[in-house]
């Protein structure tokens, strides 16, 4: 397990490079060191309003004014929220695929194409982000609604006369 994680370290932690780039911009905007921004990021692991958060935030509050502290914290939270974590995406994909692979011994190209179509166009029933609920991955990426799945496969839907 340790060797597997070591070999996959770069791909699993790729999101930290994206965060580092975003944090550099925040540090430049507020004339702060990158270390302070990363400390603010680490602070977000604690429950807001909890005693651990209050204790760990004191050194940062002393370094920054109260107004600047709130602005920097909001910027860090926004940067973290807009950055997809690679490992969570992989876990999500794996949890969606594993039931389909368990059903079949041999997986051919046609089955994979059908599975890809199905998963790309099946809406998420639940999500932490309300903007993603009841939308398919394709709708989220293209930011447009797509036609009925039968029409996407080239069939004409039957419509009753009024």
Image (cartoon, helix red, strand yellow):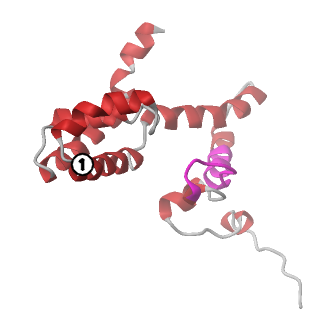
Seen as rendered, the residue at the extreme left is: 31
- Judge left or right: residue 4 versus residue 139: left
In the rendered picture of this protein, how many numbered marks are placed on residues? 1
Q: Measuring 42% from the left and 32% from the top, which residue is drawn there?
A: 45
Foreground pick, 99 / 48: 48
49 vs 150: above or below: above
- Report the front residue among 69 and 108: 69
Q: Secondary structure at mark 1?
A: helix
Question: Dividing the image into 4 quarters, which one contains the C terminus?
Answer: bottom right
Residue displayed at 64% across by 51% down: 117
Residue 117 placement, left or right of 31: right
Could you classify mark 1 by the number of other residues whose Cα lies within 10 Å: few (under 14), some (14-19), or many (20 or more)? few
**Residue 119, x across and y down, in percent:** 64, 48
Return the x and y of residue 1 as percentages of the image width and height.
Answer: 48, 9
Residue 14 makes an appearance in the image:
no
Question: Of 57 and 161, which appears nearest the observer?
Answer: 57
Q: Which residues are magenta?
A: 113-130
Is 29 located above or below residue 144 in the figure? Answer: above
Image point 57% across, 53% down: which residue? Answer: 137
Task: Name, please, the residue furthest toward the top.
Answer: 2
Write down the quadrant of residue 46 in the picture: top left
Residue found at x 58% / y 37%: 93
148 relative to 62 in the view: left or right: right
Q: Is residue 99 magenta?
A: no
Vertical relation: 162 (above or below) 10: below
The residue pinned by badge 1 equals 66
**Residue 67 vs residue 120, the one in the foreground:** 67
Q: Is 127 included in the stretch rendered in magenta?
A: yes
- Residue 84: percent from the left, percent from the top? 42, 43
Q: Position of residue 64 (x, y in %)?
A: 18, 43
Is residue 125 visible in the rendered image? The answer is: yes
């Amino acid at each position: 397990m340790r060797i597997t994680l070591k070999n996959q370290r770069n791909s699993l932690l790729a999101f930290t490079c994206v965060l580092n780039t975003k944090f550099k911009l925040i540090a430049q905007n507020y004339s702060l060191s990158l270390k302070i921004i990363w400390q603010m990021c680490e602070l977000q692991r604690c429950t807001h309003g909890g005693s651990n958060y209050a204790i760990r935030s004191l050194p940062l509050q002393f370094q920054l004014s109260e107004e600047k502290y709130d602005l920097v914290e909001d910027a860090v939270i926004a940067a973290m929220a807009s950055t997809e974590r690679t490992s969570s995406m992989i876990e999500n994909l794996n949890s969606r695929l594993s039931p389909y692979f368990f059903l079949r011994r041999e997986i051919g190209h046609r089955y994979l194409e059908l599975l890809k179509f199905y998963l790309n166009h099946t809406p998420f029933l639940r999500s932490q982000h309300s903007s993603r609920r009841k939308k398919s991955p394709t709708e989220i990426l293209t930011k447009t609604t797509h036609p009925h799945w039968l029409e996407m496969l080239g069939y004409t839907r039957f419509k009753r006369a009024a």
